[in-house]
Image: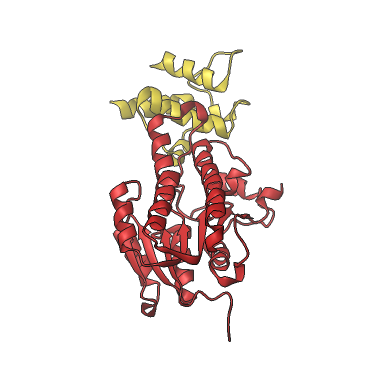
Amino acid sequence: MNNVFSLKGKSILVTGASSGIGKQIAITCADNGARVLLAGRDEARLKDSLREISDESESKYSIGDLAYEENLNSLCEQCFELEGLVLNAGMVKLLPVSFIKKSDLDLIFEVNIKSTILLVQKLLKAKKIKKGASIVFISSISTQKATVGNAMYNASKGAMNAFAKTLALELAPRQIRVNIVLPGFVHTNILGVGNAENEDLKKHRLNYPMGRFGEPKDIAYLVQYLLSDASEWMTGSLIPIDGGFSLK
Amino acid sequence: MEALFFEKLKEILEITDRELSANDKFKEYSEWDSLANLSVIAMIDEEFGVVIDNSEFKNIQTLGELMAEIKKRTK
């Protein structure tokens, strides 16, 4: 049976693949037939991610902090020609605006957006992104609905949304599609709180009409759709996926 | 240290109508909210060079306990 949602025969690079949403995206891609290059900073955790992927997929990993340009260059060199690219690497630091420091701002913009832009630039220049490929940015619903203390992160993800739309326009003639996923709160360790749901999170969960936060799989299935041929006519779209959080 | 601490705290919480005391359970102030929570943690880092993470901060109830924690870590 010809399954239009299959990723068979596709080579896909996922950044931030050592944990959380990125790890699940890599696993879901491989489960659906893709060969995946997992990029991340932590070798032990990348190995763990790869262990959950079947051997037949010929997936591999690349270690490096993408805030450094030499690591972007080496990732680009190691990378196979791509039918899919998922830009997921990112970090959060909660600070009220009046306490923002240049050093924090520089780090968040470096990791969340500058390295992402440069990676896309380098992959395009090296002709690693094939005609008809799909590029997926993992942004955040917080660019549409603000929460207190998140200004630096939101600003970086807002820049990502604007960049991705411009990229979509530039790449459309080559049938390369670019879409932006806006997840609500997903159970991962990005906030450094582990999986235990503390009082603050319990309170925050009341803002989710469907009664629960997201799981990495919820996001991974949407990304699978965006990487597959099923979404061939879709480009430049900002897609909220948040259990109804932005409805209120 | 105490004077500076109270002054900065009043500034963040925009308290102008009263003095603060070490016995105050500050999280019960009407001015207390999630922004105040983040701001006080950031202020302690900026002014006293002490990093208290949110989970530790949760266990602290009074201003006296908070000051004791800062003093303990600046020694």
Chain B pictured colour: yellow
Residue A82 in the image: state x and y as whole percent: 43, 66
Nearer to us in this view, A172 or A202: A172
**Vertical relation: A81 (above or below) A198:** below
- The spot of residue A126 in percent (x, y) is 36, 59
Number of marks drawn: 0
**Quadrant of the rendered image containing residue B64:** top left
Residue sticking out furthest to the bottom? A1
Q: Which chain is the one coloured red?
A: A
Q: Looking at the image, which is closer to me, A189 or A218?
A: A218
Q: Residue at x 39, y 28 (%)?
A: B45
User: Vertical placement of A210 versus B20: above or below?
Assistant: below
Q: Name the colouring of the figure.
A: by chain
For the N terminus of chain A, give its image quadrant.
Answer: bottom right
As drawn, which residue projects farthest toward the right? A248
Q: Nearer the viewer, residue A2 or A155?
A: A2
What residue lies at 59% left-to-right and 32% top-to-bottom? Answer: B33
Residue visible at 46% across and 36% down in the picture: B57
Relative horizontal placement of residue A234, taking residue B64 as reference (left or right):
right
Vertical arrangement, residue B42 with respect to residue A127, above or below: above
Q: Quadrant of residue A144?
A: top right
Whether residue A16 appears in this view of the structure is no
Residue drawn at point x = 59 percent, y = 55 percent: A213
| Residue A173 in sight in this render | yes
Q: Position of residue B58 (x, y in %)?
A: 49, 38
Measured as percent of width and height from the top left, residue B55 is found at 45, 41
Instruction: Name the residue nearer the viewer: A67 or B3.
Output: A67
Task: Describe residue B42's horizontal placement relative to residue A51 as left or right.
Answer: right
Up/down of A225 relative to A171, above or below: below
Q: Residue furthest front?
A: A173
